[in-house]
Amino acid sequence: MKNRYVTMAASYLAGLVFSLGLAVSGMTDPARVVGFLDVAGNWDPTLMFVLGGAVVTTFIGYRWVLKQPAPLLAGRFQLPSKQDLDAKLLGGAALFGVGWGLSGYCPGPAIASLGGVSLPLLAMLATMVLGWWIAKRVV
Amino acid sequence: MELTSSLQGLLGGVLIGISAVWLMASLGRVAGISGIVGTLITQRPRGDSAWRLAFLVGLVSGPLVLMLMGGGLGNVANQPGEVIGEPIGGVPLMLAAGLLVGLGTGLSSGCTSGHGVCGLARLSPRSMAATLTFLVAALFTVYFVRHVFGGGA
C-alpha cells in the first residue's frame, strides 16, 4: 500500500502549505480579520490581498491542472456538481458570515490556531463541530 | 508597516493558492476546510478519511513550524513576531460564533476556502453567491457589533 502513504504525504503537504499561508498572511489573528470587515472603522486591507493572491493563484493553477486527464494520485477530479442557488446555500452562508464577523474565525484559521490554544478557541471549535453535525444529521 | 502586512497577506494568499492547486493536482480534491474536516468528523467515510486526517494534521502544523522558526514570519496585528493572535471574544461569544460557523458552512457546503478561494477560482455561480452572502453578512455583523451596539471589541 505504498500509494496510500504517498497520498497521505501529498495531503499533509497541502495542509501544511495552506496553514503556512494562513499564518504568514495574518489570518491566524482574528483581530486582523475583523479589522478587514470593519469598513467603518480603522480598515485593515490585509485580507483583500490574501483572498486576491489565493484566488488568482488558484485560478491560474486550476486552468492547467484541470486540463490534465486525471490527478497524479487519484482516478478522477472530484468537483462539486450542484448548480442551484437555494435557501440552504444562501441561508447557510449568511449564518456563517454572522459567526465569522462575531469571532474573526472561519474554519481554516480556527483549526490552524490550535497551536496557540485557548479556552475561547476550544469553545468555538467544539460548537463548530456540533454545527457541522447538526447540518448533516438534522437539517 | 502597513505595506509589510499587505505583502505578507499577498505571499500567504499565494501559498494558500499553491496548496489548493497542489491538492487538486495530486488528489483531485477541492481545498475546502469545512468540507475536508467536517466530513472527516461527522461521517468518517470509509476509504476516504486518511487523506482528510493527513490534511488536518498539516493544517495544524504550519503555524507551529513558524513558531519553532522564531515567529518572524507571523503577521499578527501590532505584535511583531507573534504567529497566532488571541481570540477577540470570551467563551460565550465564541460558543455562539462556532455554532453559526459550523451550521452555516455545513448547510452551504463550504467556507472561505471552499467557496471563497476554490469556488471563485472555478467561477462557480454557487460559490460566488455564497461568498458575496457571507461577506455581506460578516460586514453587517461587525458594523453592528462595533458601531451600533458599540461593543468596542
Image: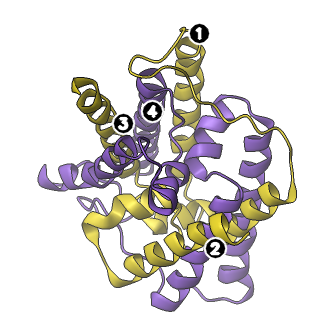
Chain colours: A yellow, B purple
Q: Position of residue B120 (x, y in %)?
A: 68, 36
The kind of residue tagged 3 is Ala
Instruction: Tell me the distance, in whole angstroms, between the alpha carbons under discs 1 and 2.
Output: 37 Å
Which of labels 4 and 2 is toward the front?
2
Quadrant of the image occupied by residue A58: top right
Q: Say left or right for B130 vs B27.
A: right
The kind of residue tagged 4 is Val
Same subunit, labels 4 and 2: the answer reads: yes
Q: Earlier in the sequence, mark 3 or mark 1?
A: 3
Give A2 or A125, whichever is nearer the viewer: A2
Which numbered dot is residue B100?
2
Quadrant of the image occupied by residue A14: top left
Q: Residue at x 80, y 47 (%)?
A: B129
The chain identifier of the residue carrying mark 4 reads: B
Residue B147 sits above or below residue B41 on the image: below
Give B133 or B81, whichever is nearer the viewer: B133
CB-based contact (under 8 Å), mark 3 and mark 2: no
Quadrant of the image for the C terminus of chain A?
A: bottom right
Instruction: Tell me the distance, in whole angstroms, between the alpha carbons under discs 3 and 1.
Output: 20 Å
Q: Which residue is mark 3?
A: A14
Q: Say left or right for A95 vs B61.
A: right
The kind of residue tagged 1 is Lys
Quadrant of the image occupied by residue A51: top right
Q: Which residue is mark 1?
A: A67
